[in-house]
Image: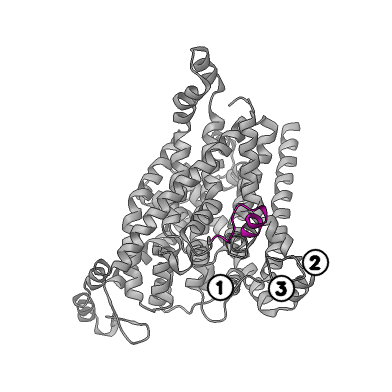
Amino acid sequence: MKPNRLLMAIPYIWLLVLFLAPFGIVIKMSLSDLAVSIPPYTPQLDISEGWAGLRALFANLDFENYAWLADDPLYINAFTSSLIIAAVSTLLTLLVAYPLAYAMACAPRRWRGLLVMLVILPFWTSFLIRVYAWIGILKSEGLLNQLLLSVGVISEPLVILNTTTAVYIGIVYSYLPFMVLPIYAALEKMDGSLLEAAEDLGASRLSAFWLVTFPLSLPGVLAGCFLVFIPALGEFVIPDLLGGSNTLMIGKTLYVEFFSNLDWPVASAVAVVLLAILIVPIFLFQRQQQKVSEQ
Amino acid sequence: MTGRFSWFNATSVALGFAFLYIPILILIIFSFNESKLVTVWGGFSTKWYGELLQNEAYLNAAWVTLRIAFVTATVATALGTIAAMMLVRSGRFRGRTLFTGMVYAPLVMPEVITGLSLLLLFISIGMDRGMLTITLAHITFCMCFASVVISSRLVTFDSSLEEAAEDLGASPLDAFLSVTLPNILPAIAAAWLLTFTLSLDDFVIASFTSGPGATTLPMKIYSSVRLGVTPEVNALSTILIGLVATGVIVASLIGKRAERITEAT
């Protein structure tokens, strides 16, 4: 069916109005100033003034908030520590996910459906609840410390909750399915006779893995890394609930600026910078998705 | 890949699933704890479930969340189906790159950015914030998930079947309804379930776009968790996990049965 044009326009217009246009508003807001009024910013467009109102609006926009972000080490630290946390936890997720995905692809065919469902199932349960579950495990009188103390591995409770370690655990745990599934999909498609050929030609199992299996699974690895890194960079719930006040992450900074400090212009400037950082990985991710879907 | 399931593989699977499921199991076990302390076992009890069912704030929030999720899933799946048709069947059209970008970007966009930008939009057009604005926000990102799920099925479906129906005299709409739709129905059902869960689950975007009087369940859970770990939240989590697990298992059984029926015919 040649899709009906009028019908087709609905999702297009919907996304233009509710996804793209709001970014314009965020950019405009990031150039405004904080003010004691409702809503709390200035300048505001005065429609009754018509053309002059619009000109006055543009005359009062400036880059003050960006200068503020660049000056205050709080924001720079938040950006760098978010980048580090997101990169490290993407790597950790990959290390946990790869053996699991590999084993799933090696499993007998009749088990695979069940194994995939078991990986997806936690993803269907509430994200907030899964993060919450770790609080009871990681806190100083929590279950992990109780276990380690009773076994005698440690003599006093470890402090894990409200540290960066807890954030790593939370991110790896929450985003694991996003890494496992693309890698599994890539490995499952692989032709097993390639491995046999490599081994017939004298490669050890390990070198056959590095020379044949791993390169073939790279598209899945890449997709998984994008799917973890991009949302992790702007993550709010995990650093807020598990990282405590010690963990500086940009998503949390934005949230606090907006809801606690009520500084909409600075919150918007933070969002614009975060988006500018993310545009490259998002663009690469899309290119990769398109390539995969065209194959 | 052909199976050579080694000890290393078996250990990976065991450790991987232990990591995924032990926290959830602990959460469920402690929801039946008599003690108010979530980490000390004080005997079996179902009292937290009783208290939960009498807590009107939770019940109201659950009702608000369910209504939003139902409308969101329905509208987002319909729009997602149209978007998927557009991505898979339209070939090249003007603004295709922009459209593809707008469909894929929300999948990975940090929630704080989506939430903030939608809130500023609603404020700038003077819309009162509440259930309606949360629903609009949810439809926006959910329809992208729906269209990705549906288009992956649509790609594998042979469009010449539809052309054959049209050659035999069916109108394009008839051909879509009687040939394509039945074939992509499993994907549409999966998309509906996925978007329903995503909407049910969302905290960040809902907290940006909601207003006074519209508190969703995740917002309520978040504010109680901020105050400390409570057995009531464990009980609520257990109920939600039970519902979702049942739903997913039933859906997959229905899927299996449908597969067997199509194989048999």
> Of label 2 and label 3, which has the lower sequence position?
3
Quote the CA–CA distance across marks 2 and 3: 11 Å
- Label 3 SS: loop
Q: Is residue A164 above or below residue B228?
A: above
Count of number-bearing discs: 3
x 55%, y 64%: residue: B202
User: Residue beneath label 1, please?
Assistant: B226
Are tags 2 and 3 found on a single chain?
yes
Query: Label 2 is placed on what type of residue?
Result: Gly
**Residue A33 image point, x, y percent:** 27, 78
**Residue B230 image point, x, y percent:** 66, 71
Instruction: Single out the mark in the foreground, 1 or 2.
Output: 2
x 44%, y 52%: residue: B103
**Residue B262 image point, x, y percent:** 72, 36
Query: Label 3 is placed on what type of residue?
Result: Lys
Residue B245: quarter of image? bottom right
User: Residue beneath label 2, please?
Assistant: B43
x 53%, y 22%: residue: A205
Within 10 Å of disc 1 (Cα), the crowding (few <14, some 14-19, many 20+) is few
Q: Is residue A118 above or below residue B76?
A: above
Q: Is residue A181 above or below residue A133?
A: above
Query: Which contiguous range is marked in magenta?
Result: A145-158
x 41%, y 77%: residue: B123
Within 10 Å of disc 2 (Cα), the crowding (few <14, some 14-19, many 20+) is few
Query: Label 1 is placed on what type of residue?
Result: Arg
